[in-house]
Image: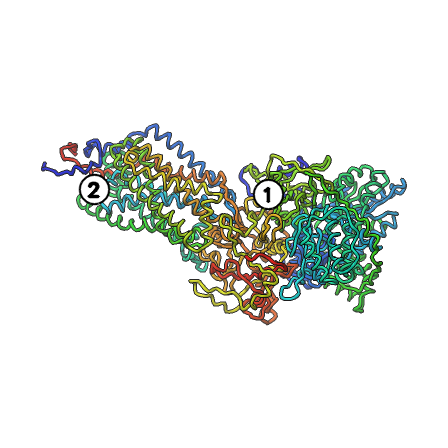
Amino acid sequence: MSEHAVSTLRRPLIDGGKDYARVSEDVCSPIERGPTSAWYYSIAASSTVLMIGVFLVVDQIWTGIGTWGLNKTVGWAFDITNFVFWVGIGHAGTLISAILFLFRQRWRTSVNRSAEAMTLFAVMCAGVFPLIHMGRPWLAYWVFPYPNTMGPLWVNFRSPLLWDVFAISTYFTVSAIFWYMGLLPDLALVAERANGWRRKIFRAVSLGWDGSMRTWTHYEALYLLLAGLATPLVLSVHTIVSFDFATAVLPGWHTTIFPPYFVDGAIFSGFAMVMTLMIIARKVMNFEEYITLRHIDAMCKITLATGMILTLGYCTELFFAWYGSNPYERFTFLNRLFGPYRWCYYTMFLCNAFIPQALWSKRVRTTPWLVFIISICINIGMWLERFNIIVISLHRDFLPSSWTMYHPTYIEVGTLCGSFGLFFTAFLLFCRVLPMIAISEVKGVLHYARRPEEGAHGH
Amino acid sequence: MTEDERRAYEEQDGREGVERRDFLKILGGSFAAMASGCDLHAPREKIVPYARQIEGQTPGLARWYASTCAGCAAACGVLVKSRDGRPIKMEGNPDHPLSRGGLCARGQATVLDLYDSERLKNPLSAGAAASWASLDAGVEKALAEAKRQGRKVRVLSQTVPSPALDAAVAEFCARHGAERVIYDEPSFAAILEAHRLTRGRAVLPRYRFENARAIASFDADFLGAWLSPVEFTKSWSARRKPDGKMSWHAQFESRMSVTGANADLRAAVKPSDMLATVVELSRLVAERLGRAAPAHVAGKTPVAHEVLRRTAEALAAAHGEALVVSGSSDSAVQRAVNGLNETLGAYGRTVDVAHPSYQRRGETGALDRLIAEMERGEVGALIVFEANPCYDHSRAEAFTAALAKVGALVSLTQRRDETATHAAFVATTPHALETWGDARPAAGVHSLVQPLIEPLYDSRSIIESLLAWSGQAVTAHDYVRGQWLKTVYPRHKGGGSFDAFWDQALERGVVSIDAPAEAHGALRAEALSGLKSARAAAAAGEFELDAYASVAMFDGRQANNPWLQELPDPVTKVTWGNVALFSPADAKRLGVEDGRMVRLSAGTRAIDLPACVQPGQADGVVAAALGYGRPSAGPIAANLPTRKLLPIEVDPPGGADIFPLASGSALSVAVLEQTSALARTQLMDSLTEPFTGRERPIIQEASLEEYRKLAPAEGVPENEAGMWPKHDYKGHKWGMAINLTSCTGCAGCVVACTAENNVPVVGKAEVRKSREMHWIRLDRYYGGDEPETNPTVAFQPMLCQHCDDAPCETVCPVAATTHSTEGLNMQVYNRCVGTRYCANNCPYKVRRFNWFDYAHDDLTQNMVLNPDVTVRTRGVMEKCSFCVQRINSAKFQAAEDGRAVVDGDVTPACAQSCPADAIVFGDMNDPKSRVARTARENHSFRVLEELGVGPSVFYGIKVRNAQVRKS
């Protein structure tokens, strides 16, 4: 073996001196061996919550949206808050797999697979809400411009809600394809290791992957292209979601800062959710040597940076409410600060602007339980951010005669919980049936910052 | 309603678990339960078309019939819209000399009373269904028994201004030696008595607000529910034109009434201080006019001298054109008012006693004497009609107790009300839309009541029943016709045959004849001396009660009417129940806030009500509306819980009965631990923002002086900014002008719109969640320098503004709300998927969402639905359409007549019913149209003009005849 220069500043991406066989063994073992009791407990809990959510949604569709706490003044609350929240969560996966790929951030390999899966599940959760928030969800297909015999009657291309339909469906499709493409080599590997019907299924879904040079060349070219394709979507989806508000006439919604502010907030919340999941997963699935403290550290740094941008956004918003000459907008922000929902605003500020400041400390960044708590705070804070934008702006708008309060019902709270049930159930099933770490990609970075003689005993 | 009955209703409701929240489903349940025994004469549907067309009847085309409103004794003229044999809407009759085309909220809601499935389906004898023959036999026997025992026969009613009915009662009385007793509650006996004492005749004058340049009102809510509000609103608003002669109006009252809200000067006065205030004002007026000062009375008015001085000056300056009215039930106050009116030269000009009003005839003590007779066991038979004496007056408890000593109680009623439940015989009466009758609300004004539908249930008119018991088998039609032949026709000037006269009277609904002036003596000065207030001031820590008839509920006779239960009180904005109103200072002192339960007690009687803080109310007064808390009115009045899945939605019965406390004694107030959230449609009362103190320029106001200094209005406000290309409205461009100076906030438009557009009723729990569905609402804002103690009040009808660049239109993903070529913002119900984005983006928050499938399974009640307007299903948005169905029918009519649509062809329901003529609708593209002129000339503004959405509703600046703070 030739002399291999290794910078002392670099640290290996994967700990534990793994070799290729070890990696395959480690990642595939959870899906080859029977699930642990912890997995059973987790899926029991999450699917129970999911079932409660399903029951509540059925009840709400059966009975009417009136089972929610909405009223003549506040027409959206938990529904669209949850939608924007979940779409935001869905940003980290594609960001990690596409943008970090383009930026050659090789540490992404340990987390990209599950982050992408998380993206898909989050977008699925998000997609539920625009559907069920409709007064007549059974007619939801009317929002698609399909050929019809009603004139034909087209959709309203001026409506930001319609733009949402396209943005979200495009994002979901591209993310799903990207994720599936990345899975192909690993699916083939799992097929190789399996017998019987599992082998057949995995063979089929690996689309005839043969591991040849040609296949790898095509694969890498496609992966790069898809990464390029997915990158603008990361920015466009939340930009368009923000148009729902930015193009409206309502003070607190009608603002040009929203597109960058929403995208940044989405990445911020997405990373927080990735960390929440990864910190649990690395412990439960014994992946601490793959998802190392250095991974957490890197994600913390991104979280900190996006959090600072977001704080700047909050301050800019307040500044322009004061500096601008729109008295309605000024009132809206004073109402956020001092109105009846002020505790939501303060909690949001605390969770999104102040608590993440702890991540300046390396000790905090490398203490998983602290990072876990911070990530949960960010999740709460980001949910409240959307709640603040939607509800606090609506409940006191132009004519004081319509001002009123919004109080959620148990159906709305339960539906939010149910969406978490859907998210975790889907994620747990994913952990059970698919390799949750990109085996082939990890193998590619196994030698990173390592002398060849360290590890890699045979392939 | 007892607990058992309530439970029975809930069981009939019978929907455990997941269910629709149809409020009226309960009614449907009970209706279905009774369906087997019920004989329902709905118009019989034919599956095959008519072989021969019924003359004058085209299926699908509405016909209008003139009749008289039976909602109260004001007897306004109405036009009733009938579609395929069903009366579906009541509107004011423009030919009626009193109401002149206006109709109040309660009057318009009477059409729903017709289709109330809680009405009695057949006569009852001893509580069981009976045939008319057996009922008549029973009543005859009871009358004979009374005669045999030498006991008295009494006929009891509230005032019904019907000469034909009076004649029938007289025949009955003559036949049975009976005596008629008339009472009114709220009572006007004090006015009658004051005139008996000061003028020698117990007469209720006809007040002529149209002749009044200066008005002072003492607790008379004449624009709200007092005496004849539609007539008074018409004539009052006719003199509120800032461009012409604008009257000046001062209001002295204990609570904030609709009238007080519209006054130029307002002072809060306790009922016990009213006499001293009138006398002090009289002294100041006399001083200015150089007349003898009135006799001194005990007590001192709390009203600031400055206020009285200004009032006295204004009244004295308007000598001969001044009017003082009082709603006080204290004869001393009324006598002082008569003296003041005499000083001001009001008699003959603004107070007409020569051609008086017959709208109230109940005299002092009549009912008390009857109760005393009953208690002594002297009454052998008591016939009650058009009254509910076991509920609707302050001595209802004593009356009910005394019924035990009455031989037989015969109740003529439409419903199993509180009195009917005690009656031996219940003769079911038809609704006014099912029978013949007449009315004479004022001297020389005779109107007819004609049936528009075959009686839905087995009923017989009061006239027919009374005549049957007098041994005459005459139909109401023949009897009324005969009466008119005898009394009206001879004095009618037109000549011609009686048949022609009768047909014409039926067509127009009303006949004006020259009534001879009734003689009355000169003022008797001695009646004005030694005045003593009948209402003693409450002791320290106690409260005086102001039990008032509210705009929506009046005395509770329409308590089971869902439109009225859900109609927000114009001032308090509370629906579905009454509240105990406290002044802000009293509320602070007691430590109560909105919704805190309080116990009002006088002696042994106590009732619990939720408190509500009312700016502008007199300290030391607790005010509460009458008419609520009826035990036997039906499930709507009882406000039954409708959805049992959510325990938070179970409501206590709507309101409490305030009549037992209404006799005027002092009350003590105890604050309870419980709370009961108010079902209020407006929670924010002020245009002043919290935190900033900025006053939002939603309503523009000016004093009369400022208004006259304004440069002549030029043109209509137009959109200047905007990114959208301008619409090119080639044909019509519909627009509306609303005059905020005229609008009194009477809420007539709200019920008009509800009836016209099939607006659903949602119930108390839903109103609490801010989900009322009204397409037009009356925003009410308090302002001024003393927003707590004496606020200025502004009403603003708010409806879809039909913006040119409507924010709702751009955001709908499925294009369910679109712009018409005539400027209408249209909601396409069957395209709507219910995202509610449009409502969020509406700056006026006028869009209403169908959160549930509302209330359409009471089949009887559904008969009131307007077939021209879609009944919306769950999950779709709805809102004001500018009555597009009326626009279209006007276009069809014009096309049929081969002409263009001209100004005045289209009148939306709200504009039609408005007693103040505050709403004008028409084509903005026609510069000569009334709406274009009004919008141009009235210094109009558009709400939130600065948003650039280009609303089509133009509000005329609100002018007060007083110095007001600039906004």
In the image, which disc is placed on residue B693?
A: none
Q: Quadrant of the N terminus of chain B?
A: top right
Q: Is residue A127 left or right of residue B166?
A: left
Please tell me whether residue B40 is drawn above or below residue B292 in the rendered image.
above
Please tell me whether residue B912 is drawn above or below residue A338 in the rendered image.
below
Q: Is residue B200 left or right of residue B32?
A: right
| Quarter-of-image position of residue B17 | top right
Q: Is residue B520 left or right of residue B568?
A: right
- Residue that badge 1 annotates: B678
As shown in the figure, which amino acid type bears the numbered disc 1?
A: Leu
Regarding residue A98, the answer to whether it shows in the image is yes
Residue under the point 43% across and 58% down: A154
Residue under the point 25% across and 50% down: A225
- Residue that badge 2 annotates: A210
Say which of B941 and B778 sits in front: B941
Q: Chain of mark 2?
A: A
Task: Give SS at disc 1.
Answer: loop
| Quarter-of-image position of residue A149 | bottom left
Indicate the position of residue B15 as horizontal and vertical percent values: 58, 39
Residue under the point 81% across and 45% down: B365
- Which residue of the protein is positioned furthest toward the top in this rendering? A37
| Quarter-of-image position of residue B514 | bottom right
Task: Give SS at disc 2.
Answer: loop
Q: Quadrant of the C terminus of chain B?
A: bottom right
Q: Is residue B837 left or right of residue A19?
A: right
As shown in the figure, which amino acid type bears the numbered disc 2?
A: Asp
